[in-house]
Image: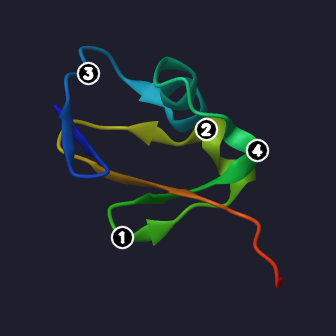
Amino acid sequence: MIIVNGVSVDQREAKHIDDLLVDLKIESATVVIEQNGIILEKEAWPSTLVKDEDRIEVIRLMGGGCQ
């Protein structure tokens, strides 16, 4: 079991961060990932394993502007 944005997610097999995003249907181009309080470099996602009891925060980037 892992926690993603405060919600328990049942995970039966080890996965890498990029695989987790695919499973959760999250577009990787617009997010930043924090694993157990540490922001991960995007280049590390394919090699970073998500382990039991990890806490993952998916932070969506949004554009803004002035009107």
**Mark 1 and mark 4: span between their CA atoms?**
21 Å
Name the residue rendered at 65%, 35% in the picture.
46
Going from the N terminus, do you reach mark 1 or mark 4 first? 4
Other residues around mark 2 within 10 Å, as few (<14) / some (14–19) / many (≥20): few
Looking at the image, is 29 positioned above or below residue 60? above
Q: Name the residue under label 1.
A: 37
Query: Residue sitting at 68 percent across and 40 percent down?
Result: 28
Residue 52, image x, y percentages: 21, 36
- According to the picture, the residue beneath numbered tag 3 turns out to be 11
Quadrant where the N terminus sits is top left
Q: Residues within 10 Å of mark 3 (few under 14, many from 20)?
A: some
In the foreground, 32 or 51: 32
Instruction: Say left or right for 55 vs 28.
Output: left
Instruction: Give me the residue at 38% from left, 38% from top.
Output: 50
- The amino acid type found where label 1 is placed reads Gly
Point out the frontmost of discs 1 and 4: 4
Tell me whether the residue at label 4 lies in contact with that at label 2, contact meaning CB atoms closer than 8 angstroms: no
Amino acid type of the residue that numbered disc 2 sits on in the rendered structure: Ser
Mark 4: which amino acid? Ala
Q: Which of marks 3 and 4 is nearer the N terminus?
A: 3
> For numbered disc 1, what is the local secondary structure?
loop
Q: What residue type is labelled 3?
A: Gln
In the structure shown, which secondary structural element does the residue marked by tag 3 occupy? loop
Disc sitting over residue 53 in the figure: none
Residue 29's label in the rendered image is: 4
- Mark 3 and mark 1: span between their CA atoms? 20 Å
**How far apart, in angstroms, are the residues tagged by discs 4 and 2?**
17 Å
Q: Which of marks 4 and 2 is nearer the N terminus?
A: 4
Where's residue 10, x and y in %?
Answer: 20, 22
Q: Which of 26 and 3 is in front in this view?
A: 26
Instruction: Tell me the residue that label 2 is attached to.
Output: 47
